[in-house]
Image: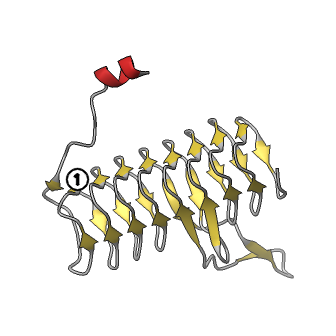
C-alpha cells in the first residue's frame, strides 16, 4: 500500500469558492474549504476545516459537516444531516431522503407518514456513489465510526450500521435494522432485526 500512496494524485488540494455557487450569509464556513461551481448551500449550514464540496452538490438546511470531509460532484444532502470528520461521500449519493413510510387508509390508499428525523454519519465514514441513506421517521439513522458503504446501497429509515462495518454494492438494509460492529456483507438484504 505505501507504493500506491506514492502514486496517488490527491483530490483534496482545491481551495476557495468558485463562481456560480449559492451560499447564504449565515453559513459558517472555514476559509480553508473548497466549494465547487453550481453548488447550493442552504441556510444554517456549518462547514468545518479543509472540507471539499465538488460542483453541483446540494447541502440542505442546518446540515453540519466536520473537518477534512470530501463531498464529490452531484451529492444531495437533505436538511439536518450531521456528517463527521474525515468522511467521503461519492458522486450522486443522497443522504437524508425521506424514509418509506405510508399508512394504509380505509379506502385502500396510502397516506404519507412524516419523516421527522435525520441521518448521522460519524467520523471516517465512506459512502459510495449512488447510495441512498434515508432519514429516520423519529430520531436518527446512524452510520457509526469507520463504516464503509459501497456503491448502489439502500439504507432505510432508523437503521444503525455499527463501527467498522463494510457493505459491498447492491445491498439493502430494511428500516430499523441494527448491524453490529465489524460486519461484512453485500448483494443481500437485511431485514428489521439485529445482526
How many marks do you count on the picture? Answer: 1
Quadrant in the rendering for residue 44: bottom left
- Please report the residue visible at 83 percent of the width from the left and 55 percent of the height from the top: 194
Residue 10 vs 178, above or below: the answer is above
Q: Residue furthest front?
A: 2
- Numbered disc 1: secondary structure: loop
Horizontal side, residue 104 vs residue 91: left or right: right
- Please report the residue visible at 27 percent of the width from the left and 28 percent of the height from the top: 9
Residue nearest the viewer, comparing 142 with 21: 142
Residue of label 1: 36
Residue 95 vs 165, above or below: the answer is below
Horizontal side, residue 82 vs residue 174: left or right: left
Percent coordinates x, y for residue 123 in the rendering: 49, 55
Which of the image's four quarters has the N terminus?
top left
- Please report the residue visible at 19 percent of the width from the left and 57 percent of the height from the top: 32
Horizontal side, residue 133 vs residue 54: left or right: right
At label 1, counting other C-alpha atoms closer than 10 Å, the crowd grade (few under 14, some 14-19, many 20 or more) is many
Horizontal side, residue 87 vs residue 116: left or right: left
Percent coordinates x, y for residue 158 in the rendering: 69, 66
Percent coordinates x, y for residue 148 in the rendering: 57, 43
Way the structure is coloured:
secondary structure
Residue nearest the viewer, comparing 27 with 1: 1
Percent coordinates x, y for residue 87 in the rendering: 44, 51
Amino acid at each position: 500500500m505505501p507504493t500506491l500512496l506514492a502514486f496517488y494524485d490527491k483530490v483534496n488540494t482545491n481551495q476557495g469558492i468558485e463562481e456560480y455557487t449559492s451560499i447564504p450569509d449565515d453559513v459558517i464556513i472555514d476559509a480553508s474549504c473548497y466549494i465547487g461551481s453550481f453548488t447550493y448551500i442552504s441556510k444554517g449550514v456549518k462547514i468545518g476545516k479543509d472540507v471539499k464540496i465538488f460542483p453541483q452538490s446540494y447541502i440542505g438546511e442546518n446540515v453540519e459537516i466536520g473537518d477534512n470531509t470530501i463531498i464529490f460532484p452531484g451529492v444531495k444532502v437533505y436538511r439536518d444531516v450531521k456528517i463527521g470528520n474525515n468522511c467521503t461521500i461519492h458522486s450522486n449519493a443522497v443522504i437524508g431522503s425521506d424514509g418509506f413510510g405510508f399508512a394504509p387508509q380505509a379506502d385502500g390508499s396510502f397516506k404519507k407518514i412524516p419523516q421527522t428525523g435525520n441521518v448521522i454519519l460519524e467520523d471516517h465514514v465512506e459512502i459510495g456513489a449512488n447510495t441512498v441513506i434515508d432519514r429516520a421517521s423519529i430520531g436518527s439513522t446512524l452510520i457509526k465510526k469507520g463504516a464503509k458503504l459501497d456503491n448502489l446501497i439502500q439504507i432505510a429509515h432508523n437503521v444503525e450500521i455499527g463501527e467498522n462495518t463494510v457493505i459491498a454494492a447492491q445491498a439493502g438494509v430494511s428500516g430499523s435494522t441494527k448491524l453490529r460492529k465489524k460486519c461484512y456483507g453485500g448483494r443481500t438484504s437485511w431485514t428489521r432485526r439485529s445482526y
